[in-house]
Amino acid sequence: MRLADYLKSDNILGFAFTKYKVIRGVPYISRKPVVVFFVKQKLPMSEVSKEFQIPPTYAGLLTDVIETTQPISLIPPIRPPTVGLQTDRFRPVLGGISGAGETSTACTITGFFGDPHTGNVYIVTAGHCAGRIDLSCEINGSVGKRFLQPSPIDGGILPNDVIGTVAWVSQFATNMSEDLALVMPNPGLEWRNILAGLRIPFNGEMRNLGFEDIGRSILKSGRTTGTTIGRIYAVGGMVKIYYGACGTNVVSPVVVTTKMIERGDSGAPAIDFNGTFYGVFIGTSSDYSFFVPASKVAEKGLLPIRETTYIERLEFKI
């Protein structure tokens, strides 16, 4: 049975590869990859149909089963208590601040990325941030929509706070798709590729994550929860994400971290202390968060733009 076939079970939420094997609540480190399955509920074997019983080993690798809640990628219904911080209006525009499509409520801007072949610059964020997903499923209709900073729920208004136009959105309501969006900035928009809160500049590099990165500490800067530090728990995953009116769909590949985000942090960049880009956060459960790896952004021909501004002298907001 293929690993992807296990996701046909309503109880199994996803899987990924880690080096941790939890035994009686204690995590042990394995030298070989461990296939970890995330489930809604751990059940006795007698209550699980034979085809979805997770064996102790799979293709020679140990397995593990972890209980967590349904991963979600929903926009927030209200303005968070962080008003006056990363929900503000920022000019120049930075990474890690409030930003969303005109019919959305609130998300986070990842940062600014460039196509070295065309010279085009794009704002990157999560795909579901480009349009409304809770009451309707605006995916195809998101392209061409105006993108605001701050987000509409954070006080962004038309046309004063429009910073660009949605140029492309992935089909995240289709299984095995990523969850990304590209926004074409307005001509003359002032921006800096620095993360608000952290004040860490993008160094122009991205990391392709592998087994050796499990356990690595990472940072995120997001609209709702600001700066958080976590660690990579698993890589190479397929995870079911709940998108409201857009349904529950499998996003692949994803990187699993310790819990680092809440609603409204979708689009937040995963980054290290040196400014190397790791990916774009898209969803969270009760115990873990999930991001699309940098490799999926690279597939669009884009690289994070290296920031050279002298940070100490930068005026961050008005």
Image (tube, grey):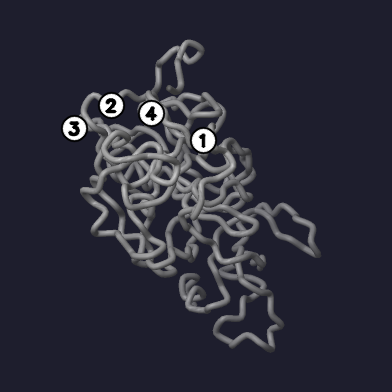
Tell me the CA gap for discs 1 and 3: 25 Å
SS type, badge 4: strand
Mark 2 or mark 1: name the one nearer the start of the chain: 2
Say which residue label 2 marks: 189
In percent of the image, x 33 and y 40: which residue is there?
A: 157
Tell me the CA gap for discs 4 and 3: 22 Å
Mark 4 or mark 3: name the one nearer the start of the chain: 4
Mark 2 or mark 3: name the one nearer the start of the chain: 3
Task: Describe residue 70's horizontal placement relative to residue 65 as left or right.
Answer: left
Tell me the CA gap for discs 2 and 3: 19 Å
In percent of the image, x 57 and y 81: which residue is there?
A: 52
Say which residue label 3 marks: 118
In percent of the image, x 54 and y 69: which residue is there?
A: 13
- Disc 4, disc 3: CB below 8 Å? no
Query: Which mark is drawn over residue 93?
Result: 4
Is 159 drawn above or below residue 204 in the view shown? Answer: below
Tell me the CA gap for discs 2 and 4: 8 Å
Corner quadrant of residue 202: top left
- Disc 2, disc 4: CB below 8 Å? yes
Q: Position of residue 73 (x, y in %)?
A: 47, 57
Query: Amino acid type of disc 3?
Result: Thr
Query: Amino acid type of disc 4?
Result: Val
SS type, badge 3: loop
Name, please, the residue furthest toward the left: 118
Q: Position of residue 94 (x, y in %)?
A: 42, 29
Is 196 drawn above or below residue 10 in the view shown? Answer: above
- Disc 1, disc 3: CB below 8 Å? no
Query: Which mark is drawn over residue 211?
Result: none
Say which residue label 1 marks: 271
Query: Amino acid type of disc 2?
Result: Leu
Mark closer to the observer (4, 1): 4
SS type, badge 2: loop
